[in-house]
Amino acid sequence: MDMKERLQELAEAAGKRISESEGLEKLNEVRVAYLGKKGELTAILKSMKDVAPEERPKVGQLVNETRSKIEALLDESKQKLEEAAREEKMKQEVIDVTLPAKKAKIGHRHPNTIALEEVERIFIGMGYEVVEGPEVEYADYNFTKLNIPENHPARDEQDTFFINDSILLRSQTSPVQARTMEKGKLPIRMIAPGRVFRSDEVDATHSPSFHQIEGLVIDKNITFADLKGTLQEFAQELFGPETKTKFRPHHFPFTEPSAEVDVSCFKCGGKGCRFCKGSGWIEILGCGMVHPNVLSMCGIDPEEYTGFAFGVGLERIALLKYEIDDMRLLYENDIRFLKQF
Ligand code: DAH
């Protein structure tokens, strides 16, 4: 067989294999089989030394033509295969714009948030400002300026987390009282909601982190009657117009006199039930007239100004209002629980 025929056959065979290749990978195998280093056409090229010298240019030209032919066929087929693959991919990626959209799940306001907004609404309605203070606080503000000197046993009652000797996680929102008074803008009518910390074990009524709402009023001629009237109004707004309040004498270092406030049980109206443990009353907050020592330490003249303060547990309000019997439920953030309120 002469060279021309051999090359023709080779080109035909290659063409057949190319047209039969079903994927780019197969096509590449064909390319290697003919044009690769050890490919058939390369082998022919190597055997050129057996061709008579005067024939060589002609045969060389034939080999090159064959090579171009095969390459052209390969390219053409490659383009077709690539196009087919692209089309297949497009088909798979088609977006059906008529399908229903994924629903964004909407969360729910936390009972704490609902209760806080209610408390804020009540006090803003009475002309109070809402202020905030830092959760990481100086022991000075958390204790000393609130008339709880170093080594006072009241510090142990509010055992908290110390960052160092003088900085701690606030155990109460009362330090915001001192911060607000120190600013020197009088009169003051503010509430200060926020997170507080105590080194308490978790149980149905305790948590190492919970929330309080502090209240402070400072002006000339503020009396205990103002305190009583304000908290009575607050209790009625929060728990209903039938609500009665009872002020029991108590002790807080930063107020004098101090009291704890009970509200008549809004479940039984004061007759006594399981909810109020038979007493007809439910304790809700601590309060009192701001201690003259606190006023002086915070730069206010106790001869000229007086005031009252109170502190409410936010979780306590939320638990009572929504009749939740375990505080831990408030921290799990299970939407099935939260969305009931
Ligand atoms: N800070 C007190 C506590 O955490 C609560 C409190 C009581 C705040 C009486 C007050 C107050 O402002 O007058 O137990």
Image (cartoon, helix red, strand yellow):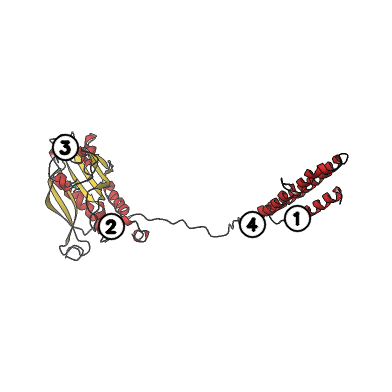
Residues at marks 4 and 2, CA–CA distance in whole angstroms: 52 Å
Q: Which residue is mark 3?
A: 295
> Pointer 4 and pointer 2: residues touching (CB < 8 Å)?
no
* Image point (15%, 52%), residue name: 260
The nearer-to-camera label among 3 and 2 is: 2
Amino acid type at circle 2 is: Arg
Q: Earlier in the sequence, mark 3 or mark 2?
A: 3
Label 2: which secondary element = loop
Residues at marks 2 and 1, CA–CA distance in whole angstroms: 73 Å
The quarter in which the C terminus is drawn is bottom left
Amino acid type at circle 4 is: Lys
Amino acid type at circle 3 is: Leu
Mark 3 Cα-neighbour bin, 10 Å: few <14, some 14–19, many ≥20: many
> Pointer 3 and pointer 2: residues touching (CB < 8 Å)?
no
Task: Note whether 90 is above or below 37 in the view shown.
Answer: below
Q: How many marks?
A: 4
Q: Position of residue 275 (x, y in %)?
A: 21, 63
**Residue 328: mark:** 2
Task: Note whether 19 is above or below 191 in the view shown.
Answer: below
Q: Which residue is mark 4?
A: 91
Residues at marks 4 and 3, CA–CA distance in whole angstroms: 77 Å
User: Which residue is at the front of the view, 184 or 227?
Assistant: 184
Q: Which residue is mark 1?
A: 17
Q: Earlier in the sequence, mark 1 or mark 4?
A: 1
Residues at marks 3 and 1, CA–CA distance in whole angstroms: 99 Å
**Residue 253: mark:** none
Q: Position of residue 239 (x, y in %)?
A: 24, 57
Q: Earlier in the sequence, mark 3 or mark 1?
A: 1
The nearer-to-camera label among 1 and 4 is: 1
Q: Earlier in the sequence, mark 4 or mark 3?
A: 4
Question: Residue 240: in sight, yes or no?
Answer: no
